[in-house]
Amino acid sequence: MKFLVGNKVDLPRAVLYEDAANLGLKYDLPYYETSAKTGYKVEEVFTTLAIEIYNKILKNLKDSILSLDPSSKVGRTTLTKFPAIKKEEDSNGKNKTEKCC
């Protein structure tokens, strides 16, 4: 996801609004004008970006779930409260220590 953001709209214009908006249309990007100094539309841009990221994560998650083969165990993990304990044996075959994971 990409945005085209013109900043410093509190200062005299260096780029015409129409030129920037047309550039956004050309590259299929939403165009916003902001001012970090005054805070003009800064929150709106970040909120919109956060929503877009969230929606993309949900879409990817949904696509992943829908593409799972229920009979496949590849990529599945079982979460447990306690990790598995592995026991090591010394050269005499006796348990010497227990290690996690």
Image (cartoon, helix red, strand yellow):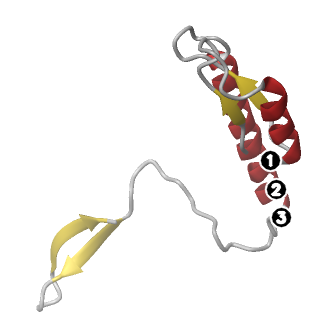
Viewer-side label of 1, 3:
1
Q: How many badges with numbers are in the image?
A: 3
Pointers 2 and 1 in contact (CB under 8 A)?
yes
Q: Residue 49, position in %: x, y?
A: 69, 32
Quarter of the view holding residue 33: top right
Q: Residue at x 75, y 74 (%)?
A: 72
Q: Inspect the image, locate mark 2, and give the three-letter code of the amino acid beneath it.
A: Asp
Q: CA distance from mark 3 to mark 2?
A: 6 Å
Q: Is residue 81 left or right of residue 68?
A: left
Q: Residue at x 13, y 85 (%)?
A: 90
* Earlier sequence position, callout 1 versus callout 3: 1
**Residue that numbered label 2 is attached to:** 63
Q: Is residue 59 left or right of residue 12?
A: right
Number of other residues with Cα within 10 Å of mark 1, as a class: few under 14, some 14 to 19, many 20 or more: few
In this rendering, the answer to whether 77 lies above or below 13 is below
Q: Which of the two residues, 48 or 20, is positioned nearer the viewer here?
A: 20
Q: Is residue 26 left or right of residue 83?
A: right
Pointers 3 and 2 in contact (CB under 8 A)?
yes
Element type at mark 1: helix
Residue 23 - label: none
Number of other residues with Cα within 10 Å of mark 3, as a class: few under 14, some 14 to 19, many 20 or more: few
Residue 59 - label: 1
Q: CA distance from mark 1 to mark 3?
A: 12 Å
Q: Inspect the image, locate mark 1, and give the three-letter code of the amino acid beneath it.
A: Lys
**Residue that numbered label 3 is attached to:** 67
Q: Residue furthest bottom?
A: 91
Quarter of the image where the N terminus is located? top right
Q: Residue 24, position in %: x, y?
A: 81, 39
